[in-house]
Image (spheres, rainbow, N blue to C red):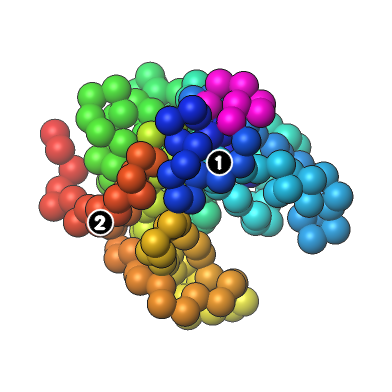
Amino acid sequence: MAWFQTDDGEQSRPGAGGSVGALGNPRSPQIRRRLDVARESTAYRAAVHAATGPLMLIHLRKASPGSPLQIANTHPFREGETVFAHNGQFDLPPGLREAVLARGGRTPEGTTDSELFFSLIELHARDTDAATAVQRAAAELTALSLEYGTRVPEALNCLYMTPDLLVAYQQSDPAQARPHHTADNYSLRYRIDADRVIVASTGIPQTAYLEVGEGQALVVGRSDLGVTLRPRLAELPA
């Protein structure tokens, strides 16, 4: 999980919560990563209790099949002030990893497919806004998956968080659904309240939630909790 602390200008804003600067720089993400099962973890409960601030991200998931169980492969991932978590997976045929890394984005910490996606996002973020960077990276990764492999990614659902905003992106391929998946396994939904915006995958009660559509990017601003839903890209820019 990860969160940003409240700064002095946010003390009285609804939904900010928490003490000011309790753990330092409000633009530096606080991150807790563990290998144990969250529902059995005292460390997870302690982290949830400590996490107070205007932006928070909690990501609980099983490791992808074949992925080594180690902290370097555990979400969320970080690059400077940016935090990233991915729900889904995609094939890693020969040449794909090398093609992504040759683009010159973020260097992965571990061996997951997710960090390759993050690498492309950080590459595109050098030239455009965060939401467009996520969408362009997803489009490029989809194209590379077909160039080096035989199918599109199973899912590229992700959360991309900076000190100023949260981007939630949804993309999945129903044809790759597994026997244990529910029909809405990769649905991504959000709820707008007066003092908060919640973005969540399935698995929790979701009364009055709206849907993030295929290829769309939801943007939530830190300063005012403003919400924008970006349409899917028409095509991958040259």
Q: CA distance from mark 2 to mark 1?
A: 23 Å
Closest to the observer, 145 or 226: 226
Q: Quadrant of residue 130?
A: top left
* Residue pictured at 33% horizontal, 45% vertical: 224
Magenta region includes residue 131: no
Closest to the observer, 13 or 73: 13
Can residue 39 be seen here? The reply is yes
Closest to the observer, 105 or 45: 45
* Residue pictured at 66% horizontal, 28% vertical: 22
Question: Which segment did they paint magenta?
Answer: 20-26
* Residue pictured at 15% horizontal, 48% vertical: 235
Please identify the quadrant where the C terminus is shown: top left
Closest to the observer, 209 or 213: 209
Image check: 97 left or right of 138?
A: right
Secondary structure at numbered mark 1: loop
Q: Amino acid at mark 2?
A: Leu
Which label is found at residue 229? 2
Place of residue 71 in the rendered image (x, y in percent of width and height, measured from the top left):
73, 35
Residue beneath disc 1:
53
Which label is found at residue 136? none
Prevailing SS of the magenta stretch:
loop
Q: Is residue 7 above or below residue 152?
A: above
